[in-house]
Amino acid sequence: YLFRRRVAINQQSRNFSSSSSKEELLLEHEVERKFGWLLKSLFFGSALYAGYQFFPYMGENLMQQSVSLLRVKDPLFKRMGASRLARFAKDDESRMKIVVLGGDKELINMLSTAKDDRTRKAALNALAKLSHSDDALASLQRAGAISVIRSAPCSLEDADVEKFKLSLMKRFQDLKYDVSS
């Protein structure tokens, strides 16, 4: 601090610059700024691409994972997969994507093998959400959902199980499917 110098305002540019005129310095500074934005854009684009590749929780991979969770033996994972599918079934396109991935058959299998009310409730909830699409309902009927829904035991503890069963059976009746068997 004994030999203080007056710091120039544009010292960094002058240290690395080979030009001397003010216009050339401004032009060089502008190029450096634009190049910085280009590097930032490349970095964020690369990070986004890497995130999409490495994190399966983005895009359609999550729907495929949810259907895969229905194939696991643990009821907790089955309930997680069913609740995810219920959330995904918002429009006809996503409902049909679930059907194409085999989610309808897995949900019916989950319901038929469920040993507790919470698992039955999760399966029935997801089936009820799928049933809002006529094409998905036709696929459920072809997969034998009516007999499985009818044979699902009644719940003494959870009224939602009965509510979902009744809404599904009513939906099958509305589209003139034979539910008497």
Image: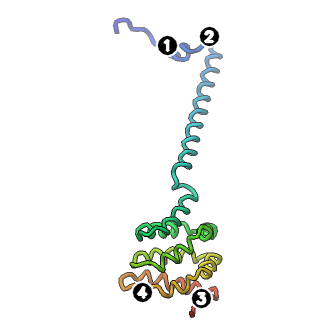
Residue 157: image location, x then y, percent: 36, 82
- Single out the mark in the foreground, 3 or 2: 3
Lower sequence index among marks 3 and 2: 2
Q: Secondary structure at mark 3?
A: helix
Q: Residue 29 is drawn in which quadrant?
A: top right
Identify which residue is drawn at 44% across, 81% down. 161
- Single out the mark in the foreground, 3 or 4: 4
Identify which residue is drawn at 62% across, 14% down. 22
Lower sequence index among marks 2 and 1: 1
| Foreground of the two, 144 or 39 | 144
Query: Going by the image, does 86 lie left or right of 23?
Result: left
Q: Secondary structure at mark 4?
A: loop
Query: Which residue is the site of mark 1?
Result: 8
Lower sequence index among marks 4 and 2: 2
Q: Quadrant of the C terminus?
A: bottom right
Q: Residue 179 is drawn in which quadrant?
A: bottom right
Callout 2 amino acid:
Ser
Query: Which residue is the site of mark 2?
Result: 20
For the residues bearing labels 3 and 2, Cβ distance under 8 angstroms: no
Query: Which residue is the site of mark 3?
Result: 173
Query: Which residue is the site of mark 4?
Result: 154
